[in-house]
Image (tube, rainbow, N blue to C red):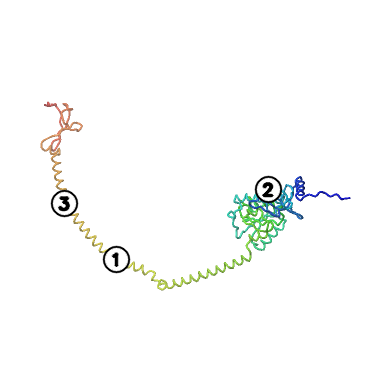
Amino acid sequence: MEEKRQRALTVSAALSLVNTELDALPLVIEGEVSQVSNKPGYKAVYFTIKDKNACLPCMMWMNRFNAAKIDLRVGALVRVAGKLSIYAPKGTMNFTVQSLSLAGEGDLRLKIAQLAQKLAQEGLTSQERKRLLPVYPEIIGLVTSPRGAAVHDVLRTLRRRYPSARVVLAGVPVEGVEAPRNMMMGMKEVVDAGAQLVLLVRGGGSFEDLMPFNDELLARTIARCPVPVVTGIGHEPDTTIADLVADLRCSTPTAAAEAVSPNEGYLDELLMRRAAQFEASLDRRIHAEGLRLKGLETRPLFKDPQALFSQAWMGIDYGSERLGRAIPANLARDAQTLSSAQQRLARASKSGFERFESQLSLASAQMHSLSPLAVLGRGYAIAYDQQGKVLKSVEGVNGGDHISVRVNKGTIACSVDAVCAENEE
């Protein structure tokens, strides 16, 4: 009996059948990106995701990828939703991605990157804002967990390199939800205690362990801290938001302690070098002053002390001689001037007196001619009433009145018998 044979399918038909079955099977897959191909001009983005045992090629149309706004890079953990399909021309399986998002740590890294970009736009991470550390700080503030290895590493390093500094410790939790607030309080406490700079440190840990150092409020507190802040968080590859805004970022807590403390050997060498420079400078100064002193010794002043006053004495002698000549000459000139003035005064006085006597005689003659006494001498008389007023007319004089008449060389008392008035024509 002839065995029944199953009807064979072409390759194209078989792959078409498989694609039909796969199209009815939507999947959501998580994996780590191991390869990315996003070239200009492509209609789609091609990448590969993997886990420990398998890898899966993925394809996402460019319009959907741009809408997702995901920075897709190797190592990112992503979550993709879509369907499996077989690319018939090559017979390879692809996952056609319809939606893409970061998963787990990848999503956290995206948020941190966005915060870092925001702070950078505000200028909080710029190098121009970062302050120089004090060279020899007297008080160092330390903010970290009191139970971790970081606090011992920092204290041991500072004790070895810079034992003269005083350390102000704020022991606070550096993990958990409340860690950012506690670290901010710790920074304030050490600054209030007089710290000239602040060390914010912790030991290594996972990405999630370091998340408190990516807190935005903590970053802004570090940026506006009144003293410089130095961070030493985790290990060399770890970089947090706190590192970006700090005035100095160090790879480890020990490196942070070394950065703020001058090496004791370096200080010894510096002091010895400065002492040698000071000694050499002092020797040069002494030598120069010695040469200057020798130069002063050769001056005539110190060989002959009288030379100090010789110029002054010569000046006095010269002035005395001039004064001796000037006084007699000036006196003789003044005597001659005085004699000339006396002669001019005598001449002026004589002529002045003669003119004055002539004018006085003339005025005297005029006054004598106008004098009432002179009039009386010529036979005239002056009558006065009882009040002593001159009688100029008969008005006001009556019979029986007593009057006095002034004549030359005397006065006559009279009694009026009658008054005769003259008619005016």
Inspect this view and state whether residue 378 appears.
yes
Q: Position of residue 151 (x, y in %)?
A: 70, 58
Please say if the residues under marks 1 and 2 sit with CB atoms less than 8 Å apart. no
Q: Is residue 194 left or right of residue 398?
A: right
- In the depicted view, which residue is nearer to us: 292 or 239? 239
Residue at the spot of label 1? 322
Q: Earlier in the sequence, mark 1 or mark 2?
A: 2
Measured along the vertical axis of the image, is residue 209 above or below residue 327? above
Q: Position of residue 302 (x, y in %)?
A: 42, 72
- In the depicted view, which residue is nearer to us: 128 or 366? 128
Q: Position of residue 106 (x, y in %)?
A: 70, 51
Residue 402 found in image quarter: top left
Q: Residue furthest front?
A: 1
Q: Residue drawn 20% across and 32% down? A: 387
Residue 311 found in image quarter: bottom left
Q: Residue drawn 29% across and 66% down? A: 322
Residue at the spot of label 3? 351
User: At label 2, which amino acid type do we have?
Assistant: Trp
Rate crowding at label 3 as few (under 14), some (14 to 19) or many (20 or more) other CA atoms within 10 Å.
Answer: few
Q: CA distance from mark 1 to mark 2?
A: 119 Å
Residue 330 found in image quarter: bottom left
Q: Is residue 207 left or right of residue 298?
A: right
Q: Secondary structure at mark 1?
A: helix
